[in-house]
């Protein structure tokens, strides 16, 4: 009898080999052994996302969140799916919940899980949504935070520059594009 970890490790290998159906089969076996194995549900959500089966992916992330409501990554990943489906309010809610969960345990998260990069990504996604909703003050605030946590991401400065241009602040736009 294999352990849930054995099946999960094999599923990871199948994913690396782009054998997604075999990865899903082994991840299902892992869940049959341990129905609360959140890493496996998150993994399955990622596979379904790759395959374009977004509803199944959302269900997997929902399961992780039901088991562990503090799962930052699952809120983040589900938020990206909602955004791609045009469900901006749901995406914004998930990004905000991910941010909240990081900030509750900021020291631990930033130390162990490369949380500053994820926090930057979260703020970047929120900034884009706020900009699309014409909530410029919130968008600029999130761009500022995103750039603080991930200053190496030129796309954040570019997008903020576009927003400055859109809102008529040509001087700040020019500074971002220089």
Image: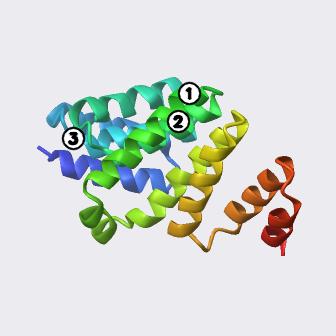
Determine the residue positioned at 26% across, 47% down. Answer: 7
Mark positioned earlier in the residue sequence (3 or 2): 3
Mark positioned earlier in the residue sequence (3 or 1): 3
Determine the residue positioned at 29% across, 71% down. Answer: 111
Where 13 falls versus 147 (above or below)? above
Name the element at disc 3.
loop
Q: Residues within 10 Å of mark 1 (few under 14, many from 20)?
A: some
Name the element at disc 2.
helix
Q: Residues within 10 Å of mark 3 (few under 14, many from 20)?
A: some
Where 15 falls versus 170 (above or below)? above
Residue 114 in percent (x, y) is at 39, 67
Is residue 16 something that shows in the picture?
A: yes
Quadrant of the frame with the C terminus? bottom right
CA–CA distance in space, label 2 to label 1: 5 Å
Which of the two marks, 3 or 1, is nearer to us in this view?
A: 1
Determine the residue positioned at 22% across, 52% down. Answer: 6
Question: Do the residues bearing badges 2 and 1 touch, measured as CB atoms within 8 Å?
Answer: yes
Judged left or right of residue 147, residue 116 is left
Q: How many marks?
A: 3
Is residue 22 something that shows in the picture?
A: no
Splitting the image into 4 quarters, where does residue 64 fall? top left
Determine the residue positioned at 18% across, 35% down. Answer: 36
- Mark 3 — residue? 37
Residue 96 in percent (x, y) is at 44, 41
Residue 175 in percent (x, y) is at 81, 72
- Mark 1 — residue? 89
Name the element at disc 1.
helix
- Mark 2 — residue? 92
């Amino acid at each position: 009898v294999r352990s849930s970890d054995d099946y999960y490790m094999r599923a990871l290998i199948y994913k690396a080999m782009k054998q997604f159906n075999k990865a899903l089969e082994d991840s299902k076996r892992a869940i049959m052994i341990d129905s609360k194995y959140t890493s496996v549900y998150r993994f399955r959500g990622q596979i379904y996302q790759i395959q374009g089966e977004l509803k199944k992916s959302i269900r997997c992330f929902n399961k992780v969140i039901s088991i562990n409501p503090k799962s930052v990554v699952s809120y983040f990943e589900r938020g990206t799916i909602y955004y791609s489906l045009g469900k901006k309010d749901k995406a914004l809610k998930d990004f905000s919940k991910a941010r909240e969960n990081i900030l509750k345990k900021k020291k631990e998260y930033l130390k162990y899980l490369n949380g500053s990069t994820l926090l930057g990504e979260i703020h970047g996604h929120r900034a884009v949504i706020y900009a699309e909703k014409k909530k410029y003050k919130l968008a600029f605030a999130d761009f500022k935070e995103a750039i603080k946590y991930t200053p190496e991401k030129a796309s954040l400065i570019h997008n903020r520059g576009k927003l400055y241009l859109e809102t008529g602040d040509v001087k700040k736009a020019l500074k971002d594009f220089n």
